[in-house]
Image (spheres, helix red, strand yellow):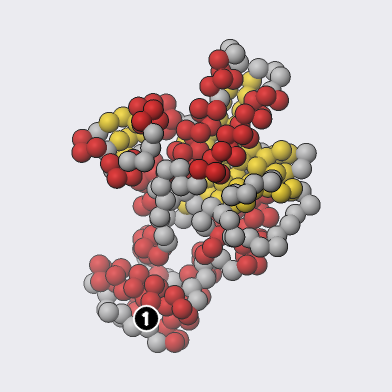
Amino acid sequence: MLELDEDQFRRWAELLHARTGMRVPPERRSFLTTGIGLRMREIGCECPDEYFDRLTGGRGSPAEWSTLVDRLTVHETRFFRHPQSMELVRDQVLAKASDCHDGSLRFEAWSVGCATGEESYTLAMVIDRSLERHRGTGASAYFGVVGTDISQPALRAAREGIYSAHRLKDLPVDLLDSYFEPLPEGRGRVRECLRRRVCFTHSNVLDAGGEPFAPLDLVYCQNLLIYFDRARRAEIVDAMVAHLRPGGLLILGSGEVVAWSDSRMERVPSPHTCAYRRVR
């Protein structure tokens, strides 16, 4: 079992914070040492200082850093993880469709910290179902979802769009039939009709302000900001708000931002979801 002295822990925690913005407080020391130790064992490295030097300079360090970050970030996610938030997404899509008078509707969404893609595909399913009535009038409707994450392995899994029976078990049968191709052993792959509406790209949330997005109708960011200190959370949220078009919706995890306010945003009344709308 790897052990880090105080100075080593401080250096590793500062490196992680500088590159990803994530804080590792002393009470989570075992989490950091376990993740580093497991990766060191995989590559046959015995000295944490040697591994640190490898990550901060020399050939191959970016690839190795990407692998370590994947070990240290939590990818716990599932389809329809927070149904109440998805109801707000549905209402946002329906409201925009009702306001569309020229017969052509576009809806753009950003899934921040998308991990292995379940959240992004859930958003795509909700948006697609919400647009069915609009299409039924003969009007055209386009939507796109961008999923971003810092983990390259997680993004590869998201792009593949193949999920185990365990991950699919709680999805309604009608959604499984409409949006997933059955595979052996109860697995399913997201159908092409939905996958072509969702793209995944590597991004550090610290760079949120510089993302080259068109004005967005929805920014969805839950269970990510908890890994950052309070000041950094506010900076990230401010940067995400800048991408919203007037009337656009921002959905955050409950309790992830406290005492945050922005003159561009108004709180959306909801007993179960933390949501804001950009003032028109």
**Which residue is pictured at 58% across the width and 56% down the height?**
254
List x then y, in percent, for residue 279: 76, 43
**Which residue is pictured at 59% across the width and 60% down the height?**
256
Vertical comparison of 82 with 225: above or below: above
Task: Using the image as rendered, state which of residue 55 and residue 145 is in the foreground.
Answer: 145
| Disc 1 residue crowd, few under 14, some 14–19, many 20+, Cα 10 Å | some
Quarter of the figure with residue 194: top left
Task: Using the image as rendered, state which of residue 200 and residue 166 is in the foreground.
Answer: 166
Is residue 191 in view? no
List x then y, in percent, for residue 7: 45, 86
**Which residue is pictured at 72% across the width and 44% down the height?**
278
| Residue type at numbered disc 1 | Asp
| Location of mark 1 (residue) | 49
- Quarter of the rendering occupied by the N terminus: bottom left
Vertical comparison of 239 with 99: above or below: below
- Quarter of the rendering occupied by the C terminus: top right
List x then y, in percent, for residue 62: 41, 61
